Image (cartoon, helix red, strand yellow):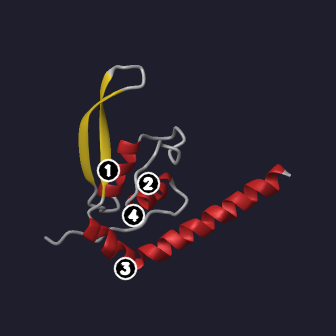
Amino acid sequence: MPSKLPTFPGPLTARGAVLAVLLSNEDQTGAEPLKGRVTLAAIVRTLKRKYHWPIETSSFPSNAVDGRATWATVYSLPENVIAKALERGGRDWLRARKQARRGMARLDEALEQ
């Protein structure tokens, strides 16, 4: 059975924010796009199951800020998946996301005045 092609979530959603970081192939610093709504793990699981993104997971032992032992998890997309996604509309999706975020920022500024 052939695997389904990945699809893009809404550009202004937390899923969209996480996918944008994965497609940029850059490290995610902190969890700002989540804003306390759901965990990063839950978003990644949804991107895998509902949107069919082949996200790779790697976990390793780490230390919390307070010194406790914990686990850190890194999520990534394979290089070939990123390249294909960008060719199949990913660049347009990222551009639309950037424009939508600018529009929201302008709206926020207008509401503050």
Q: Position of residue 103 (x, y in %)?
A: 68, 65
Say whether residue 112 is left or right of residue 83: right
Q: Is residue 79 above or below residue 84?
A: above
What residue appears at the point 61 percent right and 66 percent down from the top-left corner?
Answer: 100
Q: Residue furthest right?
A: 113
Q: Are marks 1 and 2 in contact (CB under 8 Å)?
A: yes
Q: Earlier in the sequence, mark 4 or mark 2?
A: 2
CA–CA distance in space, label 4 to label 3: 12 Å
Q: Position of residue 6 (x, y in %)?
A: 32, 68
Amino acid residing under circle 3: Glu
Circle 2: is it few (<14), some (14-19), or many (20+) Cα within 10 Å? many
Q: Is residue 73 above or below residue 26?
A: above
CA–CA distance in space, label 1 to label 4: 11 Å
Location of residue 49 by image quarter = bottom left
CA–CA distance in space, label 1 to label 2: 10 Å
Say whether residue 111 is left or right of residue 64: right
Which one is nearer the viewer's eye here, 26 or 103?
26
- What residue is pinned by disc 2? 18
Q: Secondary structure at mark 1?
A: strand
Of the residues tagged 4 and 2, which is closer to the observer?
4
Location of residue 65 by image quarter = top left
Amino acid residing under circle 1: Tyr
- What residue is pinned by disc 3? 87
What residue appears at the point 32 percent right and 73 percent down from the top-left corner?
Answer: 83
- What residue is pinned by disc 4? 23
- What residue is pinned by disc 1? 75
Say whether residue 6 is left or right of residue 66: left
Q: Earlier in the sequence, mark 4 or mark 3?
A: 4
